[in-house]
Amino acid sequence: MATEPGSAPTGQRSVLVLNSGSSSLKYQLVDVDSEQVLARGSVERIGESGSSASHTAGERTTRSDDRVSSHGDALAIVMDAFDRQGPDLDEAGLVAIGHRVVHGGGHSEPQVVTEDVLEEIEALQVLAPLHNRAAAMGIRAAQAIRPDVPHVAVFDTAFFAGLPAEAATYALDREVAARHRLRRYGFHGTSHAWVSRQAAELVERPYEQLKQVVLHLGNGASASAVDGGRPVDTSMGLTPLEGLVMGTRSGDVDPAVVLTLARAGAGPDEIDALLNQRSGLLGLSGVNDFRELQQRVDAGDADARLALDVYVHRLVKYVGAYHALLGGTDVLVFTAGVGENNPALRSAVAERLRPLGFVLDESANTAGRAVGGRVVSTPDSPVTIAVVPTNEELAIARQAVDLVG
């Protein structure tokens, strides 16, 4: 797996991976052959007061708090950090710039960014207004600064582009659905693809023969059912709002909730903000950081206890459904910040699933992190339970190099 940032050795192929958010820009320079992170950093609060930037290479981290007005300004700050602190991008063997794009519509593969591809990304803003608009701005800014290298868009939806029709189709009027492209797209696909393949290597079984349920649990959270390397269902849908309880997103709710709020006078933007920014763990307990939530649970906070119970209930519900859908599960995988770092949550989920053959080894579950992941179920557990770190940046970098050659 990738190491901490370091100086650039000679002869490598590197990819600068950019993740442009609505008010942030995060990046890593990744050597795809050694899997070493040569540098990483972020620019936060773009277009807002209190902007900040940080750049880490080797043992040194630099920070600044100058106002950043646009994604173009943010990219200029990033490039200046590479010029001042290194590593030099050309000496590091920069072969491509990889862009994480949340919504790719029907694209099932990464795309070299042309004007047509970029216009399509912008057109998909109607389905992912915050994410795709920011990605497009980041791509245009990066192309202006480094037009000499290919830019590659890697889509969060790509892994799920081939979902079976019965999983992708909403039971809506078919003409309305077709006109507005209303279907299940799924998200976090780069992570689900990476983690499911790494899990197969961890348990030393052929990827093409495994039935897996993958739980990507961070501030955003999603589940997938992967059968022989092919996703057959996933919890996120038309947008990243559907599915599991998340840090600030509601996940599944009755659609009539939206109608009820609208009839009470709430507008679309107000409802959108409620469901995406003021719901989930935050709405239930007042906090969306899982560590703080756990502290409040341990202190006897009733709201925090309910929030955790709702969160676990939804997880168990999805894992059980996917277990049935797959006709049995070989491996249950936990990944991302919460999934990788919260043994109490893994224990709570596994205990509820124990009648289905998910048997946790508590000593393995509470042991320290292991490079490449670790198995946390008992040797005789019918279902293997694993913790596998995700590495979306390395996955994006590899896909970019594979595409540009």
Image: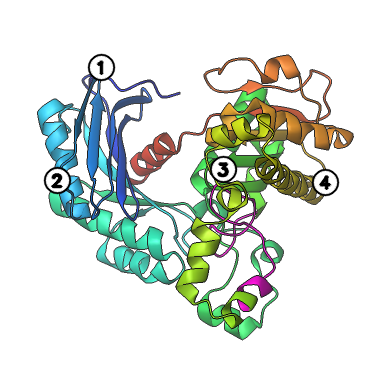
Above or below: residue 264 compared with residue 315: below
Q: Is residue 151 magenta?
A: no
Q: Residue at x 45, y 71 (%)?
A: 269
Question: Of the numbered discs in the image, which one, if any, rests on residue 141?
Answer: none
For label 3, the residue is 192
Q: Residue at x 75, y 33 (%)?
A: 348
User: Which region shows up in magenta?
Assistant: 235-259
Q: Are the residues tagged 4 and 3 within 8 Å (C-beta)?
A: no
Question: Of the numbered discs in the image, which one, if any, rests on residue 327?
Answer: 4
- Residue 157 lies left or right of residue 81; in this view the side is right
Q: In front: mark 4 or mark 3?
A: 3
Residue closer to the observer: 85 or 372: 85
The answer to whether residue 302 of the structure is visible from this angle is yes
Distance of mark 2 from mark 3, alpha carbons? Answer: 32 Å
- From the image, give the main secondary structure of the stretch colored magenta: loop
> Residue 140, how many percent across, how many down?
22, 58
Question: Of the numbered discs in the image, which one, if any, rests on residue 59?
Answer: 1
Q: Is residue 243 magenta?
A: yes
- Name the kind of residue labelled 4 in the image: Gly
Distance of mark 4 from mark 2, alpha carbons? Answer: 52 Å
Distance of mark 4 from mark 3, alpha carbons? Answer: 20 Å
Q: Earlier in the sequence, mark 2 or mark 3?
A: 2
Q: Earlier in the sequence, mark 2 or mark 1?
A: 1
- Name the kind of residue labelled 3 in the image: His
Residue closer to the observer: 354 or 224: 354
- Name the kind of residue labelled 1 in the image: Glu
Binning the other alpha carbons within 10 Å of mark 4 as few (below 14), some (14 to 19) or many (20 upward) gives few
Q: In front: mark 2 or mark 3?
A: 2
